[in-house]
Amino acid sequence: MTSTREETAAPLGAEPEAETHRDGPADLRLVGPAVAAWAAAACALGAPAGAVGVGCAAAVVVAALLLWRAKVRAAGAGGWFPPGREAGRERRAGAFVALAAVLLCAVAGAASAALHAADVRRGPLPAWAQRYARLTVDLEVTDDPRMTRPKVRGSQRTPPALVFTADVVRIVAPDGTVTEARTPVLAVVQHRDADADADADAEDGGETRGGDGGGEEGDVHPRTGPGRGAGAGRGEALSPWRGLLPSTRIRVVARAAPPLAAADRMAAVLRVTADGPPTRVGPPSALQRLAGSLRAGLRDATDGLSADARALLPGLVVGDTARVPPELDDAFSTTDLTHLLAVSGSNLTIVLALLIGPPHLASRAERRGMARHLGLSLRGTAVVGGALALGFVVVCRPDPSVLRAAACGLITLLAIGTGRRRSLLPALAAAVLLLVLYDPWLARRYGFLLSVLATGALLLLAPRWSAALQRRRVPARLAEVIAAAAAAQAVCAPVIAVLAARVGLIGVPCNLLAELAVAPATILGFAALAAAPVALPVAKALAWCAGWPAEWIAGVARTGAELPGAEVGWPGGWVGGLMLAAATVVVLAVGRRALRRRWLCVLCALALVLAVCRPASLTRVLTGWPPPDWRVVACDVGQGDGLVLAAGDGTALVVDTGPEPRAIDRCLTALGVHRIPLLLLTHFHADHVDGLSGALRGRSVGAIETTTFQEPSGQAAFVRRVAAGARIPVVRAVPGERRRLGALTWEVLWPGVSPPDVGTEGGFSGPNDSSVALLVRTGGLTVLLLGDLEPPAQQALLSAHPELAAVDVLKVAHHGSGYQDPEFLHRLAPRLALISCGVGNPYGHPAPRTLAALRSGGALVLRTDADGAIAVVGTPGRLSAVVGGRRSRRRSGASGDRPSRGGPGRGRRSAGGLRGRAGCWCRARRRCGGAVVSHRTGGETRWGSEAQRGRRPLRRAREPTRRGRSWGSVGLWGRGPVAPWPRGERAAYRASFAC
């Protein structure tokens, strides 16, 4: 998201370094007023109007006193004082004037924000929104409609919706009252079938039959391609709405709702249920029709290109990201290349460079460009350039970065036209001040903040860093590019951490590689944009040429996103942002010294490469994950399932892929899996299949096996479509099917010969009870994977396989929901139970009664929401689990375990039942015929190494209490009566504890 292309200097001052050195210290006089107006506007938007008025009045009074004091000082400066004291009085008078200017600009920003906020709350619409009234309104569209990204909630994918901002110009209330107004709103349009599906899903939510169900509006995501799976058809149904241009007037019947935040820019949210095209009551303006035809022409010109080039080129040129698929957008986000999809200063640079030539020569006699060949004067050049800048805003839409770039360009063009000296930092400050006063809502937009920060970094930091690199014999052009990318990354990374809770490690190198292709792709794209209305074949040829560099950029993003260490987690929110800002300052201070020692630079670069590439052998040594002898891994994929079973070096059987592609991709990458002979999808619910593209990414997959019950139909079609795109055959699981893969063997136990009948007396629930159940044998262990089977299917499975006996490892069905058959769990009697569920899921998974039932049977329960990824290792005589995710301090008892909020930790062996004082998790078990011995590598004492040396650790964990006939999950906070130790069991426990 770092905006390395935000070059206010580039369009009209391409050599900020030379200007900085020539003009001396940076001119910061307008920075204070701009920052004051920005901060005051941001605060006033959410403050009561009375408080804003009092604050503004007080600031005006103080400013008047300061100006009066400055006048007195200035009047006294011409008296009998010595020259030194006279100069000091003049400086103090100037300081008073500067402080008064800061206060007055703050007053202006606060007053403008208060007026804009009051205008939003004016009229009858906010009151109707509080009542959730159904209204008939006339809307004037103010931006391009965009599709939301489908979001998985439980077992269902939320239906796609189309969103756009608009102004309500006419309201017909439920009582028939007609009101003229101009109130900003957010319109959310859904197809009528989607509403019906959402209602049906809600009825199946929680722990009832039919899945986890439920629907929630997807995230508004402007860079989202067509909907996936079941939503794709409904997305096509909304296509007439996607063609709405700004300034078009439509009439809709909508249900009003209040915005999420009281200080929102929108007065209400209008939910529209569409069963056809919109009713237009007014055409768009001529200017918007022209801009729309240009954007449509560019899309037509790119129709014959490859998928990545067709999606990316309109985004690079005019910010049209409607075709960018979710996986490509995720890749751009991971590699910090998202700024390439947001039109910014570099786009305007290209447009104006064609007119004025090299910016630093624009006001000289030797200037170049089309203006010189056309014989335009400086003033004429400024006028034409201003018209181009305004047209640029109309075509590319008034996003924050576009407005910032255009404002800076217009200010600098004014300087060229009047013959004044161009000063880039004051131009940026003046642009910020004017934009905040014109539209105070920009003060609260992160896009505007990132744009300004990146531009300021290019003006202040990049020239100095470039000079430092050149002093160390780095070529000038390379030094400038590196400095620009690094400066923008350094100042924008804390803001990104606030939003995304992550830190990108490959943003700078990916930006350097992408920069090679940005200029040719953008120039050729603009040429295609201009040629499309008059000569579409010429535009197609230009777009074909631009497609090559666009594919290069997409390849850089995809390749970088596949690296294991492309990004790392970081605390989110403003606390995390401040922490990262402080860490950045420390790193820069250390790096400044490191540049003086070449060997230290090489060492740091090598460390960064290792952190990004994360070789499996090195990662295992440093983190303990993955363990070298892992047999089964339950990946931490959130609220869903994703399991991996080892079948040899880099080879594995994958069962389900979770709800999100990146999670399963990271898990498989960390495990070193690059070959998947068979990928099995137990059933077609979204929390089991939506991550399919992530599992396929960069891996050789032999076949995809699915259940025989092809419902939900939309998600089954999604699986077939993804498989067809990757040219992978799709087969169906056959009851009784037995397969072998290296030392791994498995048998399909369920579903039966015919799919279960939904709604019959058996009570089968469809997709859940049609899950493929596998009995796996690996390294002497028996592992039973149940998908989302519910009690009717669990009972039928026992009837169909009476020979099914106790197992070593059980993947608990349906994420540990409370809908389990007690007899089934008692029959299986697992030694280790794995539950895959998401942190804070709304269904209460895993259910306390399920945890209690498993533990009462002697099972050790581990769960991905509290422990992260879980690896099963060992043999039947020495079974253990290695936890590679979150550290947790869990309290046992009937209420169940609570997930920890801790950060990521080193891989550790865990039994989840007892935490020793020396950092050891351990549990003994008589029934298993051997001890379940577990230790972690990240504790205060490395129990494994102590045992290998034949020494006993100095500290011992508290001995567990007993409950009934099985060991209770009691740790340092254990509850319940403490039973006396039977004869011989204390000695047996201590012997197993020593490992």
Image (tube, rainbow, N blue to C red):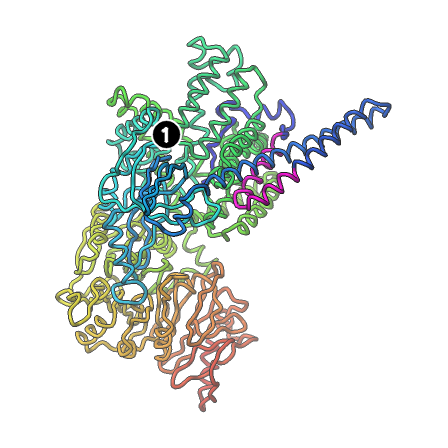
The residue singled out by tag 1 in the image is 317
The residue shown at (21%, 49%) is: 728
**In this orientation, which residue lies closer to the viewer: 306 or 234?**
234
Closer to the camera in the image, 701 or 799: 799
Instruction: Out of 982 and 55, give the one closest to the viewer.
Output: 55
The residue nearer to you, when weighing 288 against 418, is 288
- Most extreme residue toward the bottom is 983
Q: Say what secondary structure mark 1 lies in.
A: helix
- As drawn, is 960 to the left or to the right of 557? right
State which quarter of the image contains the N terminus.
top left
Location of residue 388 with respect to 607 vertically, above or below: above
How busy is the neighbourhood of tag 1: few (under 14 within 10 Å), some, or many (20 plus)? many
Residue at the image position 59 percent from the left and 39 percent from the top = 595
Q: Which contiguous range is marked in magenta?
A: 30-59
Q: Is residue 38 magenta?
A: yes
Instruction: Tell me which residue sits at (41%, 35%) in the image.
Output: 342
Give the residue displayed 55% in from the left and 46% down from the top: 48
What x and y, as percent, mark residue 731?
17, 56
**Which residue type does callout 1 highlight?**
Val
